[in-house]
Every structure is written in structure tokens, then in C-alpha cells.
Image (cartoon, helix red, strand yellow):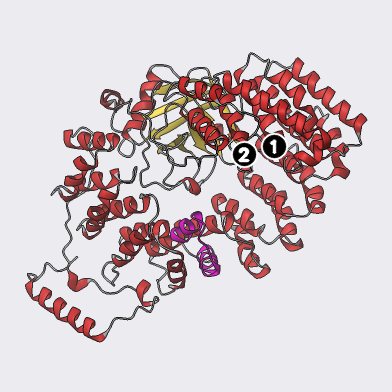
Amino acid sequence: MPLANRHQPPYFEAMNFFVPCRVFFALLLLITVQIACIPPGLQDEEDNTRVSIDLKDLTTRKLAEFQDLRLTDSLLPYLEHENASYRYFAASAFGSYSDEEARLPLVALLDDPQDLVRSAAAYALGQQLPSSERLGEELIANFRLDSANRSRESFSYLLQAIGKQASERRLEQLASVKNYADRDTNLLAGTAWSIFYFARRGLLNEAGTARALELSIGDHAQEIRYPALAYLARYAPELDGDQVAKLSPILSDDPSADLRMLAALAVAKSPNQNSATLIEQQLGREKDWRVRSNLLGALNRFDYTVIRRIVPNYLDDPHELVAQRAAGIFVNNGSPEDATYYWKMARDSSLTWSVRYKLYQAANQHLPVYFSDYRGSINYQLQQRFAQTEDVYQKTAILESLAAFPWNYRIIQDLGLNSKLKPVNTAAVRALASISGRDDFDEFFRSSNRRVRIELAQAFQLAIESGDAGMIYEAAQPLSQPDNPYLLAYPDLNWAKTTLSNLPLPEMVESYRALQNAINQLEGRPQMTEFAPPEYSRPIDWEALTAAGDAPIIRIHTSKGKVDLALWPELAPNTVSNLLRLAKEEFFNGKPFHRVVPNFVVQGGDPRGDGYGSVDFSIRTETPMVHWDRSGLIGMASAGRDTESIQFFITHSGTPHLDGNYTAFGAVTEGQEVVDALLVGDLIERVEIR
């Protein structure tokens, strides 16, 4: 837009910026001169060149490859290309990786005549890491709002980028702007997302909470209310009774399950009798299993008397993931007085195995030490069940239940480390690590604490020397902790360094990084937080994309039914081509969903079945302008930037804390009810390209 039309926006009016008079008149003179130089009728003219992504176009393919190879010097010239589609694609590329060389060219692109290009530039600037106060100020300087342009979508992305980059004092100013009209959807949604992203960086204050509350209620559009409620649910500190009263109608009456889910967590920020009653009443009438799951999760904030009254009613909920959530509350917030009650319920054969082993875990965790007879019976039953079942995931759940009583560490070693099942090996080391990390370790083991530490140190060394990806990663965790109790346990670390040097990359990149940090910690060196990406090894498969057509659909045949997903090659070409290629090779056939987190995700594609399986290639992270704000999005599991390969996940509900960090590359079109029914161990029978 011409300088003549760049008025200071209401956003800045609220900031009370002071401009000396001489500067003001100088600017006024400059504006007058520039207006005189602009041909009549062109001052407000936008470039109407349509942005469209055509992956058959050779230049677009070249840009996608530049992004994939992180070739900044090759991308930068296209930020100034006469073709708006190329400018848009080049700007979008920097939404997937950071490079300081792109900062100023992207800032310049905030003046592009095409709003989609401005949006892509703003999003890419928000994605640049690490966050920078200087960049935040540059973004604010480009927030030029007037009555003619306030409906631009790019302003929403600009506000979101400010939330990802600007300093805390800007949060106070942003939250104080109250003169946006109800019709200013992009500005209000951008404000809500900005508050959310400030909080994701640990920057939050009372003004932000108050503004989020205002935006979450009333007649605002859902695209405004969702990020505001997401902030209140995930990041806001405790709310007072009046604030909860304003949110209560959302929980009880709102037609959107997405909003009710968030309201359930938000009202628990004031854990009193009124909110407990509200949650209990809503649980009794709520039809959506995801909302029930969040309502139960909210009870973790309440006194045990509330938990004890409500939770047992949902251990046999019609949806197993809700029942799992209920049982988990007793693990996290159980009472020693009720430990035998948990054990009694654990023996109820009408409950599913996943719920029963959670209850065994709760009993083992909370049973007083002097109840030795009960303890012996509980652990005997768990060992018997371990021997009787052939289900690998039941075995891993049993090991977790055994670990709730730390003296079981030798039993866990015997059962888990001697198994021929890799997920069981991994679970055993994870169980030992959980024992090692207990805050009450010394108090619990008393005079035996040093001996137990030595035995655990030996177990962790054996796990690392095994060369197994899962065992290495889990064993490295306790060795990487600050105030490490194992600093004197390993006077010679050659065994760990030898293992490290033999780990194949990129297959075992997650284990490699974990072990490297463990070695650093044991040698008194700083742990690494930034790692070089794996060597580039999997280019975009254009043949696979061409064969699948412009709008590829895949059908995942599972042991619970069929799930259809529309893929987004324009947003994530390499991720989509990789999945299509794997499907054509029948890679996924027979592999389990190894991870299911209630009302979060189902995850599969791992050939090992425990999350540590991989292959000899990785692909680049692609993070397009997509909010993780709904169910049914498919994304790539990751061990860090540019480490994706074969494991994918599908969401049960919105997961906006993943925004900009995980590749989203498609969405469920049919079969979300199948996704919601999947449990750990259910199989991917095959993936069909439609």
C-alpha cells in the first residue's frame, strides 16, 4: 500500500507512543509529497494476481526442492518475483525452517500487494527461531491498520507472529486494545492466537487472561473463541469464581464440542465446590467422549473427596479411553486409605485390561509399605498375568504397574530385560528409569539406596550396550538429569562412547541424541539443545505425487474399520509423497497403533511397535500455515526438526500447542469415529491410495 494510506492503527493508539512535533510535521510533508507522486486512482489498488499452487509447474517444483534442501540463497530471489504464486511459495518455505538471511526480505514482503503473500511472510517471520525482540518490533512497525484494510487476513498472521516474537511488554499493550469491532474477525482471532503464543513462550499476565476471557464468551465467531479458550485451558493461571461463572454456559450449553472440551479444563482453574458440581453435572449428560475425557482430566485439580465421589462411576465408561482417563486419576491423585479399594476394582473382570492395570498401578503406588501381605498378593497377581498373556502391550502395562512399587526393580529386570519382545525391553528400562527418578528415592530405599543405585547403574549400562534404540533412549534419560546421582558410577565412559559411535543414522537419531547428552552430563559438559539435522536423504517423489492426482485420498484399513484422509501436497509435498510411496510399497501393512493418548492422538507406522522403530532415511519438517485446532488432522511424529520418516499420528481433537512445530499434511474426511475407537495394539491392515 502507498505510504499515504498507512495510518497508525488502534493497536498503536493504545500504546501511547509519543512522536515529537518536528518529526510529525516532517512525516506529514513526506506523505504529502508522496501522494502528489502517485497517479490518480492507483493509491488503493491491489495487485489482483491470483495465488495458486500448481505442483505440475516446473518452477513451483524447483521452489519445493529449494525448501526441502534449505537453499536460502536460491529461494530469496523469488521473494521479489513478478509472479505472486512464486512469491507466496518462497515465503511459505521459510515457515518450515529458520534463516536470519531471510528476515529482512520477508519483512519487506509484508508490503506485498497480494494479501496471501503478506500472510505467508508474516507466518514465516513468526516461525523464525530463536524468538527475537528485534523481529517483534519490526513486525509491530508493519502493523499499519486503517478503515480500508482492516479485514485483511494478513493482519491475523501478523498478530500471531507478534505473539511468537515480541517481548512481554507488548503482550500488555496488545491485550489492552479494545476498539476492534465484532466484524473484525481476523483482528480478534489474531489477538487471541497472539495471547496463546505469548503464553506458549512462558509470557502471560493478567491483562492477557482478561482479554482471552472476553474473547471466549459472547457471540464471537468460533475462530476467535477457540484460541482464547485454548489459552485459558492450557496456560492461564488459576481463575476466580466470577471468571469461571462466565465460562460455565459454554460447558453446559455450547453446541461446539471443541469449545466444551476447552471450557472443561478452564473451569477447573478454580477448583471449588461450584466448579466441581458443574463438572459432575456435565459428566452426567455429556454425549461426546472427548468432553467427558477432559472433564475427568480436570478433576486432577480437585480434592480427593471430589475425585472419590465422581471417578469410580466412569471406570466402565462406554468409551474405553474415557475409562482409562478415569483410572489414571487414581494413579496421579490416589489415597493410601483407598489403595485396597483400587486393588479390589483391579480384579473386576468386567473392566478392560487397560483400566485394570491402571488400577493395579494405583494400588501399588499408594498402598502403605507396612501392608506387606496385600503388596505380595498384588505383585504376585501381576507377575502371573505377565506370564499368562501373549499381548505385548499388556506386558508393558504390567511392567508399569510393577514399577509403582520401587522394590520391584529386580522383578522388572528379570521379566522385561530377558524378554525377546522389543517393546517389553523398552518398557522395562523405562520402568527402571521411573524408579530412579523418584523424588523420594533415598527416603524409600533408606540404607539400601546406594546399593540399589549401583544395580540400576549396571542395568542402564547393559541397556545402552545392547545397541537397541528403545533401551538406549530410555536408559539415557536418568543419566542426563541435573544433580545426577550416577556421576561416580561410571569412572570410564568408553563403553558409552563406543555404543554412540556405532549407532546408525538417521535411523537411531533420537537415541543418538539422548546418549550424547547423557555422556555430556556424566562428563560435566553442557547438554545440547540444538542438533544438526540428519543428512538429506529423501527427495520429493514427484512421480508418486503425479500418480496420486491433484487431490490425493488415502484409505487406512484398520482392525476397527476404514479411515479416509485427504492429503495436502501443496502444503507439504515431501511429506505427502513419502506417505504415498510407503503406502505403495505396503510398508504400513500389519503394523500396530502403538500409542494412543485419550483425547490427543493415535500414532502408528512403527515397525518395532514401541515408538523407536525407524528406517534409513528421514524427510524434512514441513510446517505450513495450518492450526492444529480440530480433530482428524494427520501429522508426522518427530524426534526434532527434520527427523520425520515413517511414524504418523491422527488427532482426536484440537492440539494447538503443536502449531508450527509438527508437520500437518492432511485431514480425515470419513471415519473419524474409527480413529476415536482405536486402541493400543489395533492394526493398520493396509493403506490404499484412492
- Per the rendered image, the range of residues in magenta is 193-216
x, y percent for residue 43: 14, 69
Q: Which mark is residue 598?
A: 2
Residue 363 visible? The answer is no
Q: Is residue 331 left or right of residue 447?
A: left
The one of 220 and 415 positioned closer to us in this rendering = 415
Q: Give the answer, above or below, for where 643 lies relative to 238.
A: above
- The three-letter code of the residue at mark 1 reads Gln
Question: Label 2: few (<14), some or many (≥20) within 10 Å?
Answer: many
**Magenta segment, prevailing SS (helix, strand or loop):** helix
Give the percent coordinates (x, y) of residue 281: 73, 54
On the image, the x and y values in percent for residue 466 come to: 58, 18
- Residue 294 part of the magenta segment: no
2 and 1 marks in contact (CB < 8 Å)? yes
Q: Residue at x 69, y 20 (%)?
A: 416
Q: Which residue is mark 1?
A: 324
Label located before the other in sequence (2 or 1)? 1
